[in-house]
């Protein structure tokens, strides 16, 4: 697991972690190497655009796990 870091803003310091699991409908097998690579590229673009840090991403045959860090809003 990647080490989480404190996020320092002008008025707060936070460590806010989310564990998100996205499952496929009817547990169909959808994750291949191509899907995994495209998903990682999309997550990197999201991390650049918003204040999000993807600490871990993992795909299995019918679901995807994300561990991401954000700032509270």
Image (cartoon, rainbow, N blue to C red):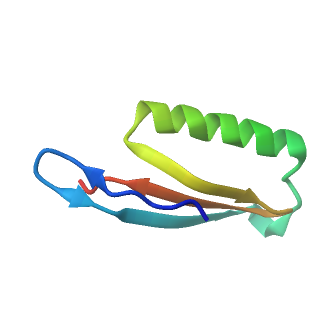
From this view, report whether residue 67 is shown above or below residue 50.
below
Q: Quadrant of residue 24?
A: bottom right
Percent position of residue 69, x then y = 43, 56
The image shows residue 3 at horizontal and vertical percentages of 51, 61
Please tell me which residue is depicted at 84% across the width and 53% down the height of the picture: 31
Residue 8 in picture, x, y percent from top left: 24, 50
User: Residue 9 vs residue 40: left or right?
Assistant: left
- In the displayed structure, 46 sits above or below 27; it is above
Which residue is located at x 58 percent, y 36 percent?
Answer: 44
The answer to which image quadrant residue 64 occupies is bottom right
Residue at the far left in the pictured view: 11
Image vertical order of residue 18 relative to residue 36, above or below: below
Residue 38, quarter of the rendered image: top right
What residue is drawn where x is 43% and y is 46%? 52
**Residue at the image position 43 percent from the left and 31 percent from the top:** 49
Q: Quadrant of the N terminus?
A: bottom right
Labels in figure, total: 0
The foreground one among 27 and 14 is 14
Left or right: residue 48 compared with residue 36: left
């Amino acid at each position: 697991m990647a080490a989480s870091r404190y996020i320092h803003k002008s008025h707060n310091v936070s460590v806010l972690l989310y564990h998100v699991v996205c499952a496929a409908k009817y547990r169909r097998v959808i994750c291949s190497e191509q899907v995994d690579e495209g998903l990682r590229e999309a997550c990197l673009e999201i991390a650049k655009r918003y204040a999000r840090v993807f600490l871990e991403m993992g795909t299995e045959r019918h679901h995807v796990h994300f561990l991401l860090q954000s700032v509270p809003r």
